[in-house]
Amino acid sequence: MCATKVRVKNVPQADVSAELDRTDKAILRQLQRDASLSNVALAEKVHLSPPACLRRVERLKRLGLIDKVVALLNPQAVGAGMLVMIGVVLDRSTPESFAEFEKAAAKVSGCMECHVVTGEFDYFMLVRTRDNDSFNRLHAEQLLYLPGVRQVRSFMVLRNVLSTTELPLAV
């Protein structure tokens, strides 16, 4: 299954949303659900002619709303069925320590996301691995050696309740 990520690149939010009409939003919703739709099938779903639909999709790309088109793989099928959320606390809150950590975190095997957060932790990382044993190795070989880290707390996901790549679009 393919999906389209929608992310605005260097475009002020107010400017982009002012340029989107119902049809643009319908196109974005359809592409987020299934980006493998042919232009003809997409045009039919959003009630446009194929040339008009293609022009709109190209415009949405130029505006930076359609970032890229990717295939979403089944994590279990590719040996990455275990999802672990990792809370990280740094020992110092300096721009240098944040930059050093972020550079190293980007190299952690299976790291899908890394976010600076507020609250008890400085970062949350989402890591995919095969199983408990592979996570234990990752922890011992990589996570413990991340620079500037005072504390790492791991939360293994027991069951996925909701996971989507579809971003909400106001009507």
Image: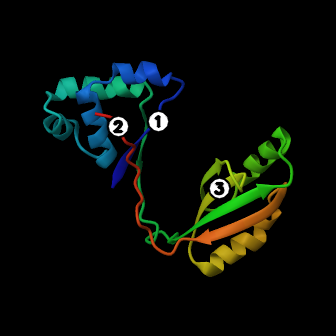
- Name which residue type carries label 1: Arg
Label 2 neighbour load within 10 Å: few <14, some 14-19, many 20+? few
Q: Which mark is residue 169?
A: 2
Residue underneath mark 1: 7
Q: Is residue 75 above or below residue 112?
A: below
Q: Up-down: is 7 above or below 143? A: above
Determine whether 113 is above or below 85 in the image.
above
Residue 163: x percent and y percent? 42, 59
**CA gap, disc 2 and disc 3:** 26 Å
- The image position of residue 159, as x and y in percent, is 46, 73
* Amino acid type indicated by mark 2: Leu
Residue depicted at 25% across the width and 35% down the height: 26
Tell me the number on the disc at residue 17.
none
Give the residue at the far front of this rendering. 119
Residue extending farthest bottom: 133
Indicate the quadrant where residue 58 lies: top left
